[in-house]
Image (cartoon, coloured by chain):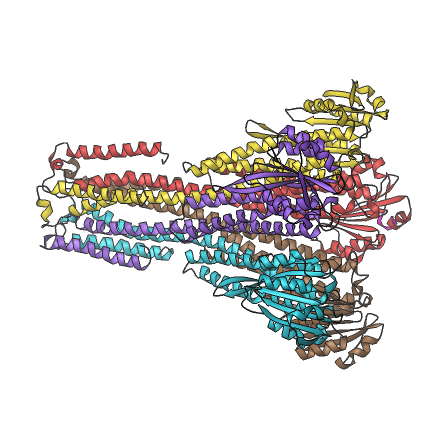
Chain colours: A brown, B cyan, C red, D purple, E yellow
């Protein structure tokens, strides 16, 4: 589905143009065209391939989808695959943005993403002095937007971890739910890592030594994106380590809880076993057992039982078994 | 066993040729020969060695089999070992494809694989404009096919993991079977990794800087294979990490289950121990025990036992021990 | 908030100058200006950007804060982000120092740090022969101060670990508190690592091969900082490994403690169960039980019970169960 | 002890020569000498040092033994240390082969190895067209033989692992023996790794870019050895990972077994505790307990006990506790 | 404290010289001075700094001590920090050797080491043909001595590990002491690694490509040191892995022991519980219980109890519970 198709000149919007006119504008040297598609049909991709003269393998990748994040050069043009990660009801949803960038065109195709990139276009149009850089700047703006959206996702995972940590250490629940949450969190971290990790490697090629033609003169900008990606990736790695630690800590706490349960049960068992023993003693059938003849023998026995239990109770209390 | 022996010119099939004529066609500059063998006999390999003038060490490797995946240059020609991985009744079966590629010949030998590569030949013959690239394109097509077949294998492992996960967290069975399945899955992942991992390193040499002669001009294609291999390998690594996590999570759940078992057993023990204590009390032989003389003493004692047990039952229920 | 704004010439302090005069001094070839801000307002940063002609992206990073430690070149000038780590009541507080360095200016902005860098300025002014090196030396002095302050933080973490270790092995408490302390310590180590780790990579670019203009001729100094950073990082990594080991050792000790608890409980249970069994025997209603008729039967039974318990007590004592 | 001392020319054996004549043959340009020693005495080494003009440090290494596998250049000659690994009664025995290779000599010294390298010499003499390559080919043949002998050792370890796995999962024995076997296997893997790992790094220098003079023109051969070494090393690494996994799986199974033991014990305990409770009830001394007066009261009570136990038995059976 | 101050020429000792004359000898082109200090005072270091014209940062490092092992170039001279590791009563003591090496001087300062380096000096003086190499050879000899002293330390740790292993598997003691020993061993390994690890990286710069002036022509020697360092480091890494494995194996054994304890306790419990049940049965008050009237009823009951217990004892014995 076509979202936008706009021609720009000197950093300023010329006009929304019909798809058929793309090739006209693309051939004008000082002008570039930015087309945005959403969940593109094969036919649309085929049309774009013709208009922009895209490479067969790149178009095929875009058609199939489910590529890993990457930046590939095809002659003078770039084919970029970015993954968006969105939080939807506690689950992470991975979308895909395929960006074809040539000297004077940008074609972005987004699939399975809830939120669009109209704000990126708006920001670019508000800053004509930057948009003058041409299609490379648009690529930067799109990458910057995708990467910046990783941070709130990461923050939500961090909040999850903190909640699990406080549940684990509150002592109330060292339970099945915590274990499942940690496992689930690990899954989500892997998902986010799969989006941000490969992109890090790819972005490193857009600044520094030899860079693709369309990105030249923009090293500072792509280095900035790279820097954000390093931050995301290092944060993810740290959190993965903490999740692993939390899992093993949780196991320690479960084992500890078992230990405490055992102690508590033993204490209760003692409170029952000792009176039973006393009762057993006075249930013996010896002919000569003075206590049995006492008028107060029975109350005395009961008092003995209760007395021992009270004493035990306090001892168990003191040593933390109850 | 010979499967095919076909000469191609300008991307089009010339003819099926007898093995003896191979050297004739190979010497024609604008023509190449593509021979496919299956579970080749030493004699057949020897014959091919003569026809194509293959290097001794490469032929020896093909004869012995059980090489690791690799791509080796012998002068102008390439010797490639690929591993196929096929699912057969829940088990992974590893096969081997040895491909000898020269400027104007391709010899592929497949061993221990159920599925052949006729579809690759068919696809190549349907795209004469690509097949014009010559033997390098055939190598690409074979590698692409082998690598593409890793994905469904990986998907089946992923399904296995998801089933184990849901069994683990369903709570019904934290058992021996899950542990064995996880261990088995780990084995399979190692098997797949052994096929895909070494190939990744090898493929990296077929594009980028200096590339072997027969692969020149096809960088985009081999980069595409490389890219798929990275994806497979990263997926395998992620899954290995998840399997490790799942194993340790399972241990936590087993320990937790033990804890819960202990609690439940203790609860049942209490339901038996307390009436026993009460019975012990009324089994004492004191001369003066008023209850013993009551007409309703016995029912009262029974009611006391049942009453305490009912009370305990509800308390245990409430605190989740039963 | 402006802290200082001083012009230097030939390694000696010229004068405190008003902000408006900065551009005057900056344009004098043999002179440099060192400005220190604290928790700078956007307006102040904007003013500095004008005076020093700073790059937009760097200023934006300083405005947003929460960058990872890094050293970036913008043309001839450097933008450096350092993290300070301070101990406040057992918690680690991370602050940020943004340093802009040009040929003849240094602008340092510190955020969220309790302790300032007046001592660095004082030290620089006491060593005019070194300060002659210009702005690069000031950068070194600031980095050196930040890195040196990591050591006492690390030492405090080391002390924490030693305390936990001695608590763990003292046997008195293999408890929840130790587990939580270890987890907490891990968190702190990650925090310190996040400050020191990225800085290590960045500092490596300031000596050796090609170095930024402002750092030239100071390789020995930056190598010294680098060396300290390696030490901090290796210490952190070692301690992380020891924390992991301590966690797993603690689990072993908890499991062992459980084992010992079980044995002790079993010993106590035996001390109750055996007399109960004896009492049960003498509670049987056989018509012909000689002991029941003995005058000393009851004392004998009690003595038997006590005797067996004393015997068991010593055996349990000897085998370490009690 | 001298094993062989033979001069070769044009790939063919000239003659067995006495040690004193070595320097004569070595000085002939088209000829090379291959000496094999076993558990060499210092005096023998000293003699060889003179004859071949070996480097002091290399000879010292050979004298001390216990070097790690390595390949070192001393001017035009190579000093190679290889480790043999032999299985002797279930234990791995590490031997050492020191090979000095010059343009026209090979001196091999083997220590602590049961099996010699006569077959390597025989193979070389059978293939004169290859032996023509000179001393470099002999080095290749020795390395190839050493590395090929790693494979059966690895296979024996693999068999061990499979036996342990089947013992672990057979359920019969999750015992001490399995744990010890796994630990022992880990030890053996480390031993094999210590032989094969360093050799991998060293071998990489014998082909590819600049290679030592004596190995020139033999890249395909050394690459083949390298390839085998990679295979051994990757197999070892995989098996180490599987051993680690097996260890942790075994722990899970032990914990699980404990859980099952607990349940079984609890079931048996119930089978004893419930009749005890019933007996306790009918041991009460109430004046009015109708059952006590029944003629069939005692059989009824016994039947009740047995009945309850039979019922419990079947329930425990069904739920898998017994 | 000054230990030695000797001038050498042509590899031979000239004379012990007073400190004041150092600069005289240093200025003679064919002569070098070797000064050894122990626990040097700041004043001594200051004096040396003057005599040898040492770099301020290097002297400061030597003054502060507690540097990590490193080799730094300051112009034509080298500053080397080595760590000695000595065993003292089961504990590892880390000392520090700072070596300043110039074209014609060596200054070594040792701190906190029990054993000196007089034997190194003696060895050098015994080999004048090697000492002719000058100050670089002295550096080699010192490094060689320090590194060679790591091996017995490592061997003592290996012995410790073997003792722990045999204690763990002897079954007698899976106890607290083993866990503590393993943890302690890990600490020691880290200590040794901290000495040997950084030195490995540093030594790599003293041979191969460009090397510092004072080390030129001695590549074989420094490569030899490097090789020993690799061996130490790989051994340490292997042992760290084995310690980790041993820790987890120990946990398995503790869990297993718990399992066995539980079984043994349950067996003993059964031996008490079953007679109690029998006693309970014959303690019932039914009017018609034929056994109660038997003359041999009581002995029969006791025999029943003992009989069942003997039977159980043998069954438990057979199944390994007792």
Question: What predominant SS class does the magenta segment belong to?
Answer: helix
Quadrant location of residue C114?
A: top right
Quadrant of image for the C terminus of chain E: top left
- Magenta range: C17-21
Residue E67 visible to the viewer: no
Relative placement, left or right, of E229 versus B294 is right
Q: Is residue C19 magenta?
A: yes
Residue A47 spot, x, y in % from top left: 72, 79
Residue D264 spot, x, y in % from top left: 32, 51
Residue D64 spot, x, y in % from top left: 63, 32
Q: E132 and C80: which one is in front?
A: E132
Q: Is residue E54 above or below residue B28?
A: above
Q: Is residue C188 above or below residue A203?
A: above
Quadrant location of residue B132?
A: bottom right
Q: Is residue A270 above or below residue A159?
A: above
Residue B93 spot, x, y in % from top left: 52, 62
Residue B59 visible to the viewer: yes
Q: Residue at x 72, y 26 (%)?
A: E109
Quadrant location of residue D197?
A: top right
Q: B233 and C268: which one is in front?
A: B233
Q: B125 and A213: which one is in front?
A: B125
Q: Is residue A291 magenta?
A: no
Q: A26 and C285: which one is in front?
A: A26
């Amino acid at each position: 589905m076509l979202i936008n198709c706009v021609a720009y000149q000197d950093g300023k919007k010329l006009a929304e143009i019909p798809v058929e006119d793309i090739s006209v504008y693309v051939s004008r040297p000082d002008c570039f065209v930015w087309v945005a598609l959403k969940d593109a049909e094969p036919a649309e991709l085929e049309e774009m391939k013709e208009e922009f003269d895209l490479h067969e393998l790149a178009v095929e990748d875009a058609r199939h989808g489910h590529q890993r994040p990457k930046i590939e050069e095809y002659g003078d043009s770039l084919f970029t695959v970015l993954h968006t990660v969105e939080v939807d009801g506690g689950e992470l949803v991975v979308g895909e943005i395929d960006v074809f960038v040539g000297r004077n065109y940008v074609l972005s195709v987004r699939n399975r993403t809830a939120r669009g990139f109209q704000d990126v276009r708006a920001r670019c149009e508000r800053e004509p002095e930057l948009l003058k850089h041409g299609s490379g700047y648009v690529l930067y703006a799109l990458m910057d937007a995708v990467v910046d959206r990783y941070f709130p996702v990461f923050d939500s995972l961090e909040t999850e971890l903190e909640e699990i940590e406080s549940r684990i250490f509150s002592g109330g629940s060292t339970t099945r739910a915590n274990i499942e949450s940690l496992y689930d969190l690990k899954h989500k971290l892997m998902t986010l890592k799969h989006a941000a990790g490969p992109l890090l490697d790819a972005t490193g090629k857009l600044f520094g030594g030899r860079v693709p033609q369309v990105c030249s003169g923009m090293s500072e900008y792509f280095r900035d994106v790279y820097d954000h990606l390093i931050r995301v990736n290092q944060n993810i790695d740290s959190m993965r380590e903490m999740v692993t630690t939390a899992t093993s800590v949780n196991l320690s706490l479960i084992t500890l809880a078992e230990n405490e349960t055992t102690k508590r049960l033993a204490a209760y068992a003692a409170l029952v076993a000792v009176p039973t023993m006393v009762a057993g003693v006075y249930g013996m059938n010896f002919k000569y057992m003075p206590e049995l003849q006492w008028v107060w023998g029975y109350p005395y026995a009961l008092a003995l039982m209760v007395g021992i239990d009270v004493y035990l109770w306090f001892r168990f209390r003191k040593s933390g078994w109850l």
